[in-house]
């Protein structure tokens, strides 16, 4: 399943990043978002969600959330 369907407050392990867009892949990697890393949806916001990756919190849009498989 992708991050759009993840429950708020539950820690998941990233299984895969599904995108053909190299810029999107590089951006997610720069946030620390890659296979094997834990990720938590902190809350939903209009058009996206706030996620916790490592020690940071980031707001990502639905397009990015859809690319992250957990």
Image (cartoon, helix red, strand yellow):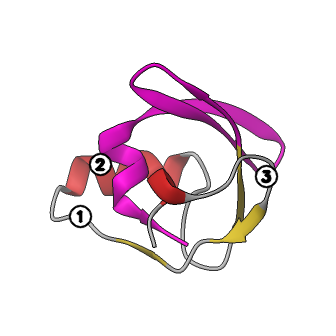
Residue drawn at 43 percent across, 49 percent down: 65
Residue 34: mark in rendering: none
Q: Is residue 21 magenta?
A: no
Of marks 1 and 3, which one's residue comes earlier in the chain? 1
Up-down: is 58 above or below 19? above
Magenta part of the chain: 42-70
Q: Residue furthest left?
A: 20
Of marks 2 and 1, which one's residue comes earlier in the chain? 1
Up-down: is 46 above or below 5? above
Residue drawn at 29 percent across, 43 percent down: 63
Q: Work out whether residue 9 or residue 65 is closer to the camera in this orientation and state it.
A: 9
In percent of width and height, residue 9 lies at 80, 48
Residue 19: mark in rendering: 1
**Callout 3: few (<14), some (14-19), or many (20+) C-alpha neighbours within 10 Å?**
few
Q: Gap between marks 1 and 3, in whole Å?
A: 22 Å
Q: Secondary structure at mark 2?
A: helix
Q: Is residue 43 magenta?
A: yes
Q: Is residue 21 left or right of residue 35?
A: left
């Amino acid at each position: 399943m992708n991050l759009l369907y993840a429950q708020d407050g539950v820690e998941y392990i990233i299984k895969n990043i599904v995108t053909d867009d190299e810029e999107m892949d590089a951006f997610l990697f720069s946030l620390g978002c890659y296979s094997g890393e834990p990720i938590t949806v902190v809350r939903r916001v209009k058009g996206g969600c706030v996620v916790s990756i490592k020690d940071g919190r980031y707001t990502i849009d639905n397009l990015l959330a859809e690319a992250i498989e957990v």
